[in-house]
Image (cartoon, rainbow, N blue to C red):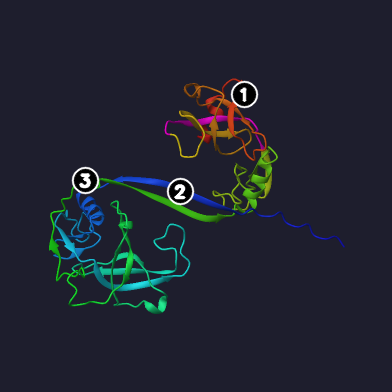
């Protein structure tokens, strides 16, 4: 009796996608964030007279432009909450805390932030809280370090309470006019059976795709199924190594942590025998000499698991009719 062969190990790896998002601020958002820097919470009054915190620039009901700023209290009431027992990096607090929606006194909408509490049993809808300001404030939502439980004290003249929203002109010295928001996503990626085989072949300096048994198109990288015919692709086909540039772009902005001098060219390359083009950087030629139809081949670095870039083969350019369906 022959033992069945073990299936190949499917790859898994942690993956991080991050980028900075830079945006300019209009007068309402500028006043709101500058106010936080100065220890003031501002909202905006809608066409119907409601006060929205955080403020928006257009009425969500009427779409009217909103500019009437008002100051609200930095005390408020929890309207709903959820316990976060395992805080992630760069969240407001390192210890377990509650995410809360807080309707600040004088506001009609709720603000999402963190509540510093010893445990879920200490949190409830309707509890009174107040802002805990950050030690250093720069004009960002993080100027509110978090909320903390608070008991109203009628004798406390500095409790931050107000009977209602107070008009504010939104004028501050050195207003905040723009912000950079760091977007980050951490997750575990598994490429699946088809792409695991593709990646393993690349480590052997081979490029392997899969052919659809119905339309016979060869997908590189393989997807495990043909998106056109909807059938599984299991017939593996080695393609390349040479290919043809079908289209390209010139990159003039240097990416963070990427040790490549700009400008450089990133192209779609149809490897010989493939039914669609893949992405690759073009090197070994001045960027302004890259063209459609250029014949290229992969360049591998020592120990590299995938081609570092593609360079011209020296062959004559491919005829347009030979690759026009792959553009």
Check disc 3: other Cα within 10 Å, few if <14, some if 14-19, many if 20+: few
- As helix, strand or loop, the secondary structure at mark 2 comes to strand
Instruction: Find disc 3 in the rendering and name its residue.
Output: 174
Q: Position of residue 216 (x, y in %)?
A: 62, 43
* Most foreground residue, 103 or 263: 103
Q: Position of residue 134 (x, y in %)?
A: 32, 59
Range drawn in magenta: 239-253
Residue 18 circle label: 2
Is residue 25 positioned above or below 134 on the image? Answer: above
The part of the image, by quadrant, that contains residue 70 is bottom left
Instruction: Find disc 1 in the rendering and name its residue.
Output: 313
Q: Position of residue 88 (x, y in %)?
A: 46, 61
The part of the image, by quadrant, that contains residue 39 is bottom left
Locate residue 145 relative to residue 320 in the image: left or right. left
Is residue 256 positioned above or below 285 on the image? Answer: below
Is residue 220 positioned above or below 161 on the image? Answer: above
């Amino acid at each position: 009796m022959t033992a069945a062969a073990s299936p190949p190990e499917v790859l898994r790896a942690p993956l991080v996608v991050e980028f900075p998002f830079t945006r300019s601020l209009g007068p309402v958002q500028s006043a709101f964030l500058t106010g936080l820097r100065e220890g003031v919470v501002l909202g905006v009054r809608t066409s119907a007279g409601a006060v929205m915190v955080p403020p928006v620039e257009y009425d969500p009901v009427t779409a009217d432009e909103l500019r009437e700023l008002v100051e609200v209290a930095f005390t408020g009431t929890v309207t709903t909450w959820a316990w976060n027992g395992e805080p992630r990096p760069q969240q407001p607090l390192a210890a377990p805390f509650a995410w809360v929606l807080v309707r600040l006194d004088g506001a009609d909408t709720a603000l999402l932030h963190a509540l510093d509490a010893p445990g879920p049993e200490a949190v409830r809808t309707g509890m009174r809280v107040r802002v805990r300001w950050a030690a250093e404030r720069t004009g960002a939502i993080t100027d509110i370090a978090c909320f903390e439980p608070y008991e109203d004290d009628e004798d406390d003249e500095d409790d931050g309470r107000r009977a209602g929203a107070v008009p504010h002109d939104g004028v501050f010295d050195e207003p905040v006019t723009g912000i950079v928001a760091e977007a980050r996503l951490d997750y575990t990626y598994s490429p699946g059976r088809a792409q695991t085989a593709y990646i393993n072949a690349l480590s052997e300096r081979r490029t392997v795709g899969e052919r659809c048994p119905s339309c016979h198109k060869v997908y590189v990288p393989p997807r495990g199924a043909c998106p056109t015919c909807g059938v599984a692709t299991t017939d593996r086909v080695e393609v390349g190594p040479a290919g043809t540039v079908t289209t390209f772009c010139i990159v003039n902005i240097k990416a963070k942590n990427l040790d490549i001098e700009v400008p450089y060219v990133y192209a779609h390359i149809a490897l010989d025998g493939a039914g669609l083009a893949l992405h690759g950087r073009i090197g070994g030629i001045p960027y302004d000499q890259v063209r459609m139809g250029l014949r290229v081949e992969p360049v591998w670095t020592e120990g590299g698991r995938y081609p570092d870039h593609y360079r011209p083969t020296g062959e004559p350019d491919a005829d347009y009719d030979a690759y026009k369906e792959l553009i």
